[in-house]
Image (spheres, rainbow, N blue to C red):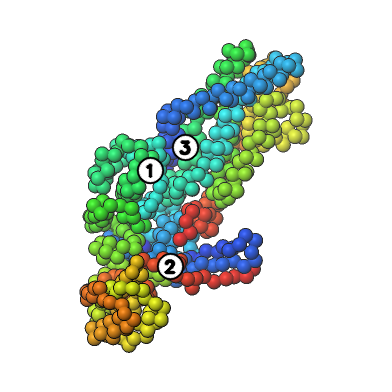
């Protein structure tokens, strides 16, 4: 393995470590990360049942509820994290070290995956046990590919957002809030995105979770193809494109923003 | 290969800010002005100056955290603007008063994490961590969570962090800040031993003159962003060999009029006065010993009495006082806004 790859992997694991340790040592987080999201999913399930919506909608809500965890992880534990690390003085040490900033960001995401995956799996299991949702297991390979492509595009976008935090600090905080609830709406976390109409759904497809969720729903509930926005192969193609654009864009943006932050003295708090 | 570990040419860093949000004028702080320095390989070089003198700004530029406004700087022969990635493989930094790391990790875990950012394998990392923890006397706390450490212990951990990557050049920004006397002594000893190794260079900033005097091969005295003098501590002190240095303690209060009178006395080159509760400590740099008579007469003129009078050898702080007319303990930012200017858009 080349020295560059080794440095990248070690940097990533180094930054992931506090998150992993935090997950293990702060077990109370399990309650907040799993039980509370199940409650909001349950609320949507009861709404759909009260409206006599098709049973597939219950499954859609479960998948959406499971996937919200990844959006929140990307937003709060990766993109916004640079702000906190700057406040604590850690950002300067990340920048000072030869390990790439992208590896640091990925480490944050990988470290946060323990809770995120736990939350997703718990919601998934709760959906099966509490609401009797039946998932199709006919396309597991394609499902895994969809999930991986969605994650690649999602965390690429997260790294792009992180570059904003290098520059804007506290102001970017509002941006994070802006990206949370509206994205829950636009990406169709709790309903098929097709319901937004073709133009809005197309615009919302820039959010990787939109097409990722739509494709996963089509693969897990093949009996309801009419709810899908685009065909699964097209959605996978767009996700691949988004992943490439976001990851490449993040690399360029991080370099550029770091350069600007160095010029403007924004990498460290003190101006002495 | 460049003979110098660090070199700067006309290095200048300005900060612009608006005193009031939306104001049309921008204030400019001259953090560094036309700094020219050369630090040789293997040298333990000190930057001595009060808070706000520009020491930290210089370190930030040399450690690639900040870009210069103009001028150039090289670290290990590499340009800090162009070759910043390659510089980062060769350097590390410790800053006094850091609160870095993660509270829920233990000391050893935190240090391992930082070692990963330098690509160290775990075996090497733990070997160095354990050896360095012993140096600073923190081995007993290796498995203590960082959130449970005292400020001094945390500073020791930060010190270890700076050395685990075994850098070619280490930047130490007030490394003994917050340490007790014993720990500071251990740290100073380690810095000296480390720099004695082949091709290891240390740039140390401090406002403890004793530290600079004890450790540094050469010292640059910096104030308000400008380098005022640069030489070995002995050579700097020799500049004051012809003068007479006195420490004086008088009772009462030194009025502005009396202060002015003192400054106007023939042969009083520079002095600092620190007012305490009921007493005043004076540090006097006089042209020769004979001037002390008129000084005492002036100070006791309004009934004050001399509590202590001592002649002594010059220190680096005296050199600083002779150069800038005030003591190291006085914060540059509190002295005035001489190094501020304004720019209208």
Compared across the picture, whether B86 is left or right of A83 comes to: left
As drawn, B120 above or below B298:
above
Q: Which residue is mark 3?
A: A107
- Chain identifier of the residue bearing label 3 in the image: A
At horizontal 63% and vertical 22% (from top left) the residue drawn is: A41
**Mark 3 surroundings: few (<14), some (14-19) or many (≥20) residues within 10 A:** many
Decide which of B314, A220 is in the foreground and name it: B314
Q: Position of residue B158 (x, y in %)?
A: 35, 48
The outermost residue toward the front is B303
Label 2 belongs to which residue? Answer: B332
Q: Which residue is nearer to you in this view: A91 or B311? A: B311
Q: Residues within 10 Å of mark 1 (few under 14, many from 20)?
A: many
Sequence-first disc among 1 and 2: 1
Residue depicted at x 48% and y 45% = A85
The residue that mark 1 highlights is B114
Residue B340 visible in the picture: yes
Q: Which mark is residue A86?
A: none
Chain to which the residue tagged by mark 2 belongs: B
Q: Is residue A216 left or right of residue B308?
A: right
> Where A138 sits versus B288, above or below?
above
Tell me residue B140's x, y (percent): 26, 39
């Amino acid at each position: 393995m080349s020295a560059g790859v080794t440095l990248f992997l070690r940097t990533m694991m180094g930054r992931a470590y506090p998150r992993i340790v935090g997950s293990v040592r702060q077990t109370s987080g399990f309650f907040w990360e799993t039980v509370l999201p199940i409650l909001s999913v349950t609320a949507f399930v009861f709404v759909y049942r009260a409206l006599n919506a098709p049973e597939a909608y219950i499954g859609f809500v479960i998948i959406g509820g499971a996937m919200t965890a990844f959006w929140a992880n990307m937003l709060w534990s990766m993109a916004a994290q640079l702000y906190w690390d700057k406040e604590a003085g850690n950002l300067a040490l990340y920048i000072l070290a030869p390990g790439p900033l992208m590896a640091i960001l990925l480490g944050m995401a990988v470290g946060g995956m323990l809770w995120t995956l736990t939350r997703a799996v718990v919601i998934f299991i709760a959906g099966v046990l509490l609401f009797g949702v039946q998932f199709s297991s006919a396309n597991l390979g394609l499902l895994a590919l969809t999930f991986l492509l969605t994650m690649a595009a999602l965390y690429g976008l997260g790294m792009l957002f992180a570059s904003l935090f290098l520059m804007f600090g506290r102001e970017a905080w509002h941006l994070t809030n802006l990206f949370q609830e509206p994205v829950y709406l636009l990406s169709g976390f709790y309903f098929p995105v097709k319901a937004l109409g073709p133009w809005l759904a197309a615009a919302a497809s820039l959010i990787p979770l939109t097409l990722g969720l739509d494709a996963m729903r089509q693969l897990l509930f093949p009996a309801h193809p009419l709810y899908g926005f685009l065909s699964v192969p097209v959605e996978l193609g767009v996700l691949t494109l988004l992943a490439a654009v976001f990851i490449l864009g993040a690399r360029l943006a991080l370099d550029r923003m770091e350069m600007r932050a160095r010029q403007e003295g924004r990498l460290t708090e003190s101006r002495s | 290969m460049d003979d110098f570990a660090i070199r700067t040419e006309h290095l200048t860093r300005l900060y612009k800010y608006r005193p009031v949000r939306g104001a049309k004028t921008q204030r400019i702080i001259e953090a560094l002005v036309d700094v020219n320095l050369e630090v040789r390989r293997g040298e333990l070089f000190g930057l001595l100056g009060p808070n706000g003198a520009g020491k930290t700004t210089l370190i930030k530029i040399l450690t690639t955290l900040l870009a210069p406004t103009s001028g150039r700087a090289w670290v290990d022969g590499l340009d800090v603007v162009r070759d910043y990635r390659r510089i980062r493989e060769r350097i590390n930094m410790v800053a006094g008063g850091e609160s870095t790391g993660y509270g829920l990790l233990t000391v050893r875990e935190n240090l391992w994490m930082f070692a990963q950012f330098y690509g160290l394998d775990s075996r090497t990392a733990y070997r160095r961590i354990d050896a360095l923890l012993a140096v600073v006397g923190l081995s007993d706390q290796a498995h203590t969570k960082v959130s449970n450490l005292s400020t001094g212990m945390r500073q020791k951990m930060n010190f270890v962090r700076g050395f685990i990557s075994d850098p070619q050049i280490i930047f130490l920004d007030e490394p003994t800040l917050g340490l007790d006397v014993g720990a500071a002594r251990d740290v100073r000893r380690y810095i000296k031993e480390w720099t004695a190794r082949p091709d290891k260079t240390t740039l140390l900033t401090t406002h403890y003159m004793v530290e600079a005097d004890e450790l540094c091969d050469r010292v640059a005295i910096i104030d308000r962003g400008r380098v005022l003098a640069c030489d070995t501590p002995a050579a700097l002190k020799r500049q004051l060999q012809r003068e007479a240095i006195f420490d004086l303690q008088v009772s009462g209060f030194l009025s502005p009029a009396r202060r002015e009178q003192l400054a106007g006395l023939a042969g009083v080159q520079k002095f600092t006065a620190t007012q305490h509760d009921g007493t005043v400590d004076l540090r006097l740099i006089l042209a020769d010993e004979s001037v002390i008579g008129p000084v005492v007469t002036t100070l006791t003129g309004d009934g004050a009495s001399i509590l202590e009078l001592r002649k002594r050898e010059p220190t680096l702080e005296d050199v600083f006082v002779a150069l800038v007319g005030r003591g190291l303990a006085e914060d540059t930012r509190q002295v005035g806004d001489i190094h501020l200017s304004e720019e209208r858009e």
